[in-house]
Image (cartoon, rainbow, N blue to C red):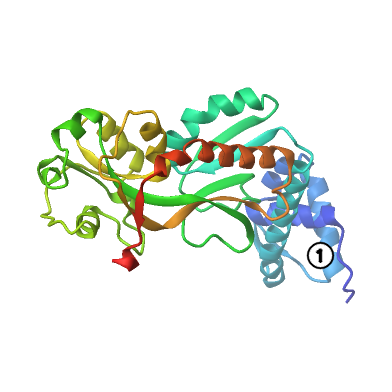
Amino acid sequence: MSNRLPPLTALRAFDAAARHMSFAQAASELSVTPAALSFQIKSLEEHLGAPLFRRLNRAVELTEAGSALSQGAAEGFQTLATAWRAAQRTQDTQTLTVTAGPAFTAKWLAPRLFEFAQAHPDVELRFAASLSRMDLMRDNVDVAIRFGTAPSPELYALPLAEEWVMPVMTPALAAQFPTVESLHNAPLIFDDSINFLNTPVSWAEWFSALGAPYSPTLGPRFSQSDHAIDAALAGVGVVMGRRALVVKDLAEGRLVAPFPTALATGARFSFLCLKGMETRPQIAVFRDWILDEINKTAHVTDGLTILELSEL
């Protein structure tokens, strides 16, 4: 038996037939006649020296040899398709597909995109607001912005600004609750989206860091940070705001932080892409733009004390 691989067209015909379990449907997918598809599979069986299908009345089923070949063939064609898309993407210097969580998309990216579009009209941005784990090559995504502690070592990972949380509120609420003690009577908003961190950074930890008592209170709870921040912007209450998601509102005065003590989260947002792709023109300009935008609001941390819970 020869170890030489059979023709790719024959393997492609087999893969389609094995997926559909129908020669007719496989022929339709490949835009060939059933007779032509049957000929390709027959040639493959001759190359192997064994049947790959059992031909039944109006149906087919895989033989033992066909079953052994089908999974590897499917994976092989998927790998080829992925590699081909990756090769095509290297020729595209205009389209940039970015995935980020809904909160980061709504509170960080969306309010700033006009400036990016003005500065880089030749880049077509596409966004997928999702927290799902993605395979950047398979899913045709150029850049992922993710919050966490350990980006995959297989990716180019650029950590962004240090993340912290602290109480933020509207100026009107700040006037009503000017001290830490008075904050005990303020309506508190709970952002549960950050509860996955190994280091808790909730209201209890913040009050404890300031040496103030904390009695759990009832208040609206949100599973998405942007919803919790929108509630604070509407004057509903005081929220433990995450730096990246509130820094623009703080810089522009829609929210204030009367108590300049923040808790470090021990995690950061990271700019992620496939290794070697960070130099592609549209990825490089997007990365540099993000870093410039972060620098524009760096002054918000002036005078801020950021506490590591391990220090307390």
Q: Secondary structure at mark 1?
A: helix
Residue designated by label 1: 45
Where is residue 117? Give x, y as percent.
Answer: 61, 25
Relative depth, front residue between 88 and 268: 268
Residue type beneath disc 1 = Glu
Residue located at (20% from left, 36% from top) = 237
Task: Answer with left or right where residue 47 lies relative to residue 119.
Answer: right
> Where does residue 212 sit, x and y in percent of width and height?
15, 56
Residue at the far bottom: name it: 1
Image quadrant containing the C terminus? bottom left
Neighbour tally class for label 1: few under 14, some 14-19, many 20 plus, Cα within 10 Å: some
Between residues 74 and 30, which one lies in front from this camera angle?
Answer: 74
Q: Nearer the viewer, residue 13 or 248?
A: 248
Image quadrant occupied by the N terminus: bottom right
Is residue 149 in view?
A: yes
Of residues 261 and 240, the one nearer the viewer is 261
Q: Position of residue 206 (x, y in %)?
A: 24, 55
Q: Residue at x 22, y 39 (%)?
A: 238
